Image: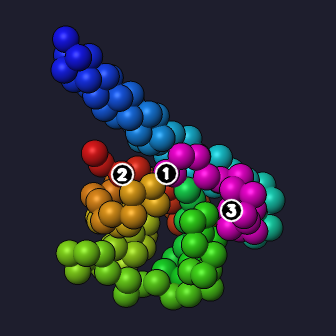
Amino acid sequence: MKKLVVIATTITLCLTAAVSFAEDRASKADAEKMVKKAAKAIKDKGDAVYKDITAPAKTYVDKDLYIVVYDMNGKCLAHGQNAKQVGRDLIGLKDADGKEFVKERVDLAKSKKTFWQDYKFTDPLTKQTLPKQMYCEQSGKVIVCGGVYKQ
């Protein structure tokens, strides 16, 4: 009987942790909504929004979702997870598979107003390299992106 209680408790804890972990994840709909919000703010208020995106207050961060803004040459203008990237030319940045994902993102933005892109990146929650899908909108002279990790 004692063994059964231990097994039941272990299963309950595992299921609770799995549900909690899933609740810490943003959805594709969340990504689209946040990107649209950031793109509108940039359109309405201009470059000042970049500071809000990058600020420690995390106005544009939800769960594992954050906003990144690039110019049309791959220069990072705002980054919701890593302020050190701001001002850097990231056009040659590669993912774990060697894919130049920022270059691909810029190329896609030159031909599409909105798009989803697949690549691999470090998950801020687990610190593991995971498949990620990035939703981007080309908005004037910038590309506004936010992504979700595939589980």
Q: Which residues are magenta?
A: 50-65
Amino acid at the residue labelled 1: Asp
The local secondary structure at tag 1 comes to loop
Pick whichever of labels 1 and 2 is earlier in the sequence.
1
Amino acid at the residue labelled 2: Tyr
Q: Give residue 78's position: percent from left, percent from top.
A: 63, 71
Residue 99 is covered by the magenta coloring: no
Front position in the image: 113 or 95: 95
Q: Give residue 100's position: percent from left, percent from top.
A: 30, 79
| Residue at point 50%, 59% (across, down) | 145
The local secondary structure at tag 3 comes to helix
Tell me where residue 139 sits by quadrant.
Answer: bottom right
List the single residue furthest toward the top: 1
Q: Return the residue at label 3.
A: 53
Q: Please tell me whether residue 34 is drawn above or below residue 5 in the rendered image.
A: below
| Residue at point 19%, 20% (across, down) | 3
Do residues under tags 1 and 2 come within 8 Å of each other at their CB atoms?
A: yes
- Decide: few, some or many residues near mark 3? Use Cα within 10 Å; few <14, some 14-19, many ≥20: many
Q: Return the residue at label 1.
A: 64
Pick whichever of labels 2 and 3 is earlier in the sequence.
3
